[in-house]
Image (cartoon, rainbow, N blue to C red):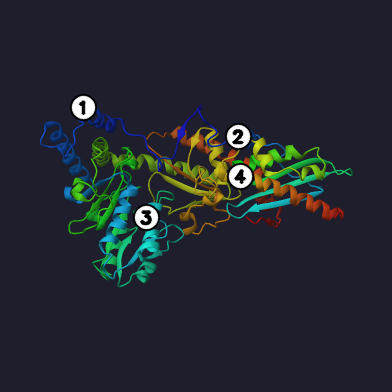
Amino acid sequence: MREIFVDYANACPVDERVFSAMKPYFTEKFGNPSSHIISKGNEALKALDESRKTVANFLGAESFEIVFTGSATEANNLAIKGTAFKNINKDKKHIIASDIEHFSITSPLRTLELDFDFKVDYVPVDNDGIVEESALRKTLREDTVLITIQLANNEIGSIQDIKNLVKIVKEFNENIIFHCDASACGGLIDVNVKELDVDLLTLSPISMYGPKGIACLYIKKGVTVKPLIEGGFQEAGLRSGTENLPAIVGFAKACEISKLEMNERAKYLSRLRDKLMDGIEKNIDFVHITGHRTKRLPNNFSFWIEFAEGESLLLMLNYLGVMASSGSACSSNLRARDEDELVASPVLKAIGVPSDICTGSLTFSLGMKNTEEDIEYIIQIMPGIVNRLWQMSPFYLDKIKGHTPKMTKVDK
Amino acid sequence: MADAQGPYSQKVMEHFLNPKNMGEITDASGIGEVGNPSCGDVMRLYLKINDDGIIEDAKFMTFGCGAAIASSSMVTEMIKGKTVEEALKVTNETVAEALGGLPPAKIHCSVLAQQAIEAAIKDYKEKKGIK
């Protein structure tokens, strides 16, 4: 049975070279960097310092500007809550975010609103998922303390012009802290903090074939945040807890390789992606591409199909060996306790996909293990899958017969 | 493949991949269409009922997830050959049970199936002038 993984936005295999670099730090070089007076600890500290330098270099930052965290979610929390808590006693309690941020941004923001009296405004995006500049200008306030906008979206791939948005914000008030969640971008597009001109930035090694359980927050020199996890003095007191050194070493190795291979990867991935996009668009009716046509991650192809539901598409694809993802409510959380926890992707709603039919969404996110043959196979099986679902869809039947559907809404 | 069925039971996957009684009955005695506003699923059930009040044929058209399609397929199998009164006794629990269980978040799909029967029979009775 064929096995084609096209869900790299959600999980990436660890590069063998990265894995090799990590291995000794599990079994032989197991020292604690805090115990650096003894040789084992000193060996670990050197590896930690070296890794931090590599990650900083990857971002165009200085070593002391990098704080390692346990995940991109944690780094986003540290950026959002850490900045808010630093300013909690001042009168500045206004925060701005884009309408398509990840849950690891919107959930802490909701907590700040509900429990700490902050006010959060969300800037809308256009139908391509690009932040509207005029709307951003209107949202800025005298008491704005923080703004958070992602570099690229992991579902629809759209890339924001962060540099320009920073300029708009800083022209209004240079003291507003600008955070950028670049966790979907590492190894796919350039992520340079000097170039982007941000104050805080989240980077994850997952999209660059690095390990899970590690990420970092870039904190520009002079910018301060309150730690969320307190204990010893690791990470300059900003993130206590014994360092996950094997993962940190792997993160650094992934950065080192990505720096060298990114252009080649982007070229390869975008060629496969374009072929897939072309094949699906040409062979299937009622397909709507989501995200910006050109300003998008090189490995991302996201779209929705009318009259077919996302989870059914995923199940049929999976049955035929193709593993993708969907933003449909039905596929959102099958481990949920009840149906109330099934929610359609807020990103799709934000870009104007009608919520009652946005359920037919699919994201193919490609990786370096995908081949031309994989793409050809997907193009070959997709029309059959879609047709099969259309054949059992009352909406499709009504469409081809020209009927207006008459439906009894059922109360929950 | 090691695990092609994901979160669902073998029975759900069988009915999802090879649904029974899929399609339209053009001269149906009763049609029930129900939807779930929270997830957008829509189930349309067609019944062909003879003069003795026996369901001779049942077909479905469904827009929805794997559980919704499997529930639709299962419910048509369960009510075929039954009288209208017997069919009304089919509950969401019996549908879910016949499918080897559903994940908690998908129980509403079997509820939809029960409601589809009720809606189709209501439509049939209205057309027939039965109270």
Q: Which residue position holds label 2?
A: B13
Q: CA distance from mark 1 to mark 3?
A: 37 Å
Alpha-carbon distance for marks 2 and 1? 47 Å
- Amino acid type, label 4: Ile
Question: Are the residues under marks 1 and 4 on the same chain?
Answer: no
For residue A32, say whether it is visible. Answer: yes
Q: Which mark is residue A105?
A: 3
Task: Determine the chain carrying the residue at label 1.
Answer: A
Estimate the x, y position of residue B56 in percent, counting from the top left: 82, 40
**Residue annotated with mark 4:** B107
Q: Are marks 2 and 4 in contact (CB under 8 Å)?
A: no
The reply to whether dot 2 and dot 3 touch (C-beta < 8 Å) is no
Q: Residue furthest left?
A: A37
User: Comparing marks 4 and 3, which lies closer to the viewer?
Assistant: 4
Q: Position of residue A88 (x, y in %)?
A: 28, 64
**Left or right of B100 on screen, residue A202:** left
The amino acid pointed to by label 3 is Ile
| Mark closest to the chain's N terminus, 2 or 4 | 2
Q: Does the CB distance between marks 1 and 3 fall below 8 Å?
A: no
- Residue, far bottom: A142
Specify whether A388 is left or right of B124: left
Q: Which residue is mark 1?
A: A28
Position of A4 with respect to A161 (left or right) is right
Chain of the residue on which disc 2 is drawn: B
Q: Is residue A198 above or below residue A396?
A: below
